[in-house]
Amino acid sequence: MGDWKAITVPVLSSDSKIIFPYTSERKRSPTSMNTQVLRLSLPSPKNMHSFFGAFCTEENLEQSISYIDRELTTMGFPSIYAESKGKELNLVSIINCMNELLVLQHKNLRAQEEVEIQHLKLGSDMDHLQNCYAKLKEQLELSKREIVGLQERDRQLQSKNRNLHQLLKNEKDEVQKLQNIISSRATQYNHDMKRKEREYNKLKERLHQLVMNKKDKKLAMEVLNYVGRADGKRGAWRTDKTEARNEEEMYKVLLSDYEQRQKQLLLENAELKKVLQQMKKDIISLLPPQKQKPKERSEDGLVLSDQEEDIGELNKENMWELSCETVREQLTNSIRKQWRMLKNHVEKLDNQVSRGHSGAWNEKDVISREDHELETEKLELEIQQCKEMIKTQQQLLQQQLTCDDDTTLLLQDCYLLEERERLQEEWRLFREQKKNFEKERKSFTEAAIRLGLERKAFEEDRGAWLKHQFLSMTADCKLENVTTSSDPDIRLVKSASRQRKPPSVLSPAISPEPCQISQYIAQNSVASEKPAADNMPNLWVESDDKEETE
Amino acid sequence: MNFSELFKLSGLLGRFSPDGKCLASCIQHRLVVRDASSLQILQLYICLDQIQYIEWSSDSLFILCAMYKRGIVQVWSLEQPDWHCKIDEGSAGLVASCWSPDGRHILNTTEFHLRITVWSLCTKSVSYIKYPKACQQGMAFTKDGRYMAVAERRDCKDFISIFVCNNWQLLRHFDTETQDLFGIEWAPNGCVLAVWDTCLEYKVLLYSLDGRLLSSYRAYEWPLGIKSIAWSPSSQFLAIGSFDEKVRILNHVTWKKITELDHPATISSKKTIVYKEVEKSPTVDTERLTFPPTRALASSLFSTQSKYEISQVPVSLQYIKPVADRANPKVGVGMLAFSADNCFLATKNDNIPNAVWIWDIRKLKLSVVLEQLCTIQGFQWDPCQPRLAVCTGSSRVYLWSPAGCVVVQVPGEGDFQITSISWHSSGDSMLLLSKDNFCVCYLEREEV
């Protein structure tokens, strides 16, 4: 804006020339206000003194004062004179006026600043607008040029199109012309052909006449002998009757052919009708039962009633034998209806599926997708498990059946070892039992021996007692039997001992005897056990024997 | 597979008898009748001139030999070798000769198609059929031999006359809507007659036995039309091969086209099997080479062996662009034949002369393509099974059946270029004909 300098109060000078250039300058350049403002606000320091000095000098002091006073009063300031007509200056009012003037000057300067700012703003706005305007103008130009270009192209294409149409028309015309030419040539040729043919026919006739007339060479057939007819019949005269018969036969041939064809067509028809009936039944079975869907009933209630009628009518066995127009139509119509219903049904199902994707489920009889998926997953798992089981079982089976030789031998050996151990266990048990049995036998034999001995003792006692009795009974008679009583004892003992080996002491006599007996029995038992042992696997018996022999 | 030795032949005139017992062949003016299985000569007849055509009668008792140059037809009997018959057309000339279905009448077409003379071997009567049409297939007999259809042309219009073969009485006479009738053929059931127009006009007319027009079919208008026609053995289908390299099949119920079978040069369908014949160089055992080389060795060295290979789809076949400004161009489906069991259709597209196309009729799709090294000369279906024999002018015979295909080299010295094949009626043997020789090929039951 400018640098503000402190402005000293100019000295008044009577030179009013400066004022005019001041004002005239103002008028001269209204546009370059900025510079002018500067010039106005900043009188150059050179001119300062001259300017201030020019207004007031010593000569025109009173005049200049009165002039200033007048100016001030017209501006609304109080007079600078102390009194209205006096020549004394009121300093206070002068100072006030100056202050007022300064304040005014400041205000003006501020206003000027603001105006300048606004001015600048407006200037930049205008620049901006001018730029926009220029750009838009450019764009407008461009688009105008484009339009012109496109129009030009359009015109070219149109003209090309017209040319092509024209060509097409020309070609078509040519084709038509050629066709016309061909047809005209064809007629011409036909005409010529006919003419030539007529000439030719005439020649033929002439020739025919000549040939028939000449008869120099006998048109004849030489045959050794006439041959019988192929079918053995005689030749017949040509009469009207034969003609009629010929006609009859011909018609018979034709009729038989037609009948055959008709039979074939009837068969085909019957088959097709059967197929249609089957299809109808299938379609009806595919469609959902009508009772559960009241909606559908309301929609095509009429159709249903017709359909039921149709079903009733056409499912009768005899009906489809007929081939009259109405029955045929009914059948085809009913099939069409059924097919349409099936189509609708399928469409509905499709809609349901698509709706189901969004998640609205109201229908009971439609399985929800998640359930369906769960089920399928479950089933898949089951299948997987079953497969695995089958695999393992197969593997095991495989192993059992088809292993290679080493493993089979090993397996066999394992099995055999198992058996062997089992058998050894059993053998051990068996030996234990045998021992027990032996013990028992021993005890039994001992008991038997004891029993024998006791019996013997008892017998002896009895004998003794009897003898004693006898003796006692016959004591009176004799006492000779007393000596014999001891003999029977000894004899008895001797006899007893004769049976067995001579014992020294009764008990030791018994013990070796039972030992021997037990040995004998043991041998017997061993011998008897031996065949029992044969029942065991031979392998083991042999090895056992081997062991025993070893 | 057994091959007989080569016998001399002239004029591709070798025929099995309809009962299959004998084989007749011509060498110049001699007619040799052999036994079909042993090829022993049973009879030898000598005709007056070079034989141009032979035909067995339907009961296999007589053979006719036609000599067109002399205008004579000689008939020989097999039962009585002494029996003879000579039919002389005189100045009328002879262009064609054939038996009637009962085997007792001979139909001679005189020169310029002036008339057809019906000579009877039983009676002295002679009948004439006037104005016969001079076309490729102007006469057709029904399969059961009852009726004969003859194409006639009077006053620039085509007519068809249907005769009863028993007594040669005219049954029906009607005009056809054709420009220039090219051929007629009875359906195997004997109730429908197919009539087709010249190749300048694609038109097939179907007439019932009593002369009513059942239907007419026209595929397109201006380009060249029908080249070949074949009925299926069950009379269900009529296959029409045309110059636009397509076969159109009509069905017998509505007489409308049920499918179009195209013959493109590139086969791209994955379900088609393409058998390609490839040459394999003969393996020569160098140790066994002798000097001078034996004939067998020499022929085996120079004859090329070949075998079939399966080509990977897509296959592009050898395509010959037809010459533009010639008549009867080698374009289009020129050969059509249905198999005896009605399941297959064999076709040949003349632009692609090395390939035989075999279509499965049940699926109406191309099932097999046989690509040969040389141009196909002809093919014939086995009369009993779905087996196709193909010959290409080489000394190899090619057999295809749904089980596979096989190349068989005819053993023998010298060149044997097979140009025609004819099956025995039992399907057990084949007659292979070349220009100068013929050979009989015996097939075993389990073959292919």
Image (spheres, rainbow, N blue to C red):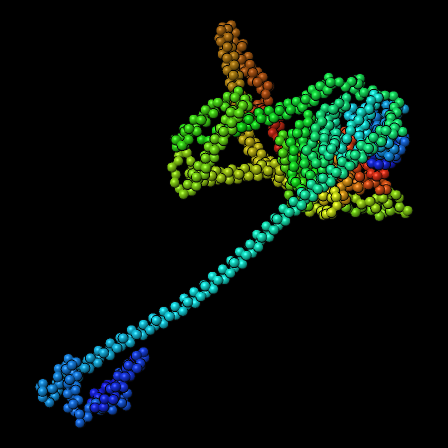
State whether residue A211 is above or below residue B357.
above
Instruction: Depth check: give the residue in front, A469 or B321.
Output: B321
Where, by quadrant of the figure, is residue A533 drawn? top right
Number of labels in the image equals: 0
Instruction: Depth check: give the residue in front, A222 or A522.
Output: A222
Quadrant holding the C terminus of chain A: top right
Is residue A390 visible in the rendered image? The answer is yes
Q: At 82% across and 38% down in the image, what residue appears?
A: B434
| Residue A135 located left or right of residue A426 | left
State whether residue A287 is above or below residue A74.
above
Where is residue B125? Give x, y as percent. Answer: 82, 22
Q: At 54% across and 16% down in the image, what residue appears?
A: A489
Where is residue A269? Give x, y as percent. Answer: 58, 26
State whether residue B349 is above or below residue A537.
below
Where is residue A261? Give x, y as percent. Answer: 64, 25
Quadrant holding the N terminus of chain A: bottom left
Is residue B142 visible in the rendered image? The answer is no
Where, by quadrant of the figure, is residue B271 drawn? top right
Where is residue B326? Give x, y as percent. Answer: 75, 45
State whether residue B323 is above or below residue A43.
above
Q: At 44% across and 36% down in the image, what residue appears?
A: A348
| Residue A443 located left or right of residue A43 | right
Q: At 72% across and 32% down in the image, what residue appears?
A: B158
Instruction: Depth check: give the residue in front, B424 or A542.
Output: B424
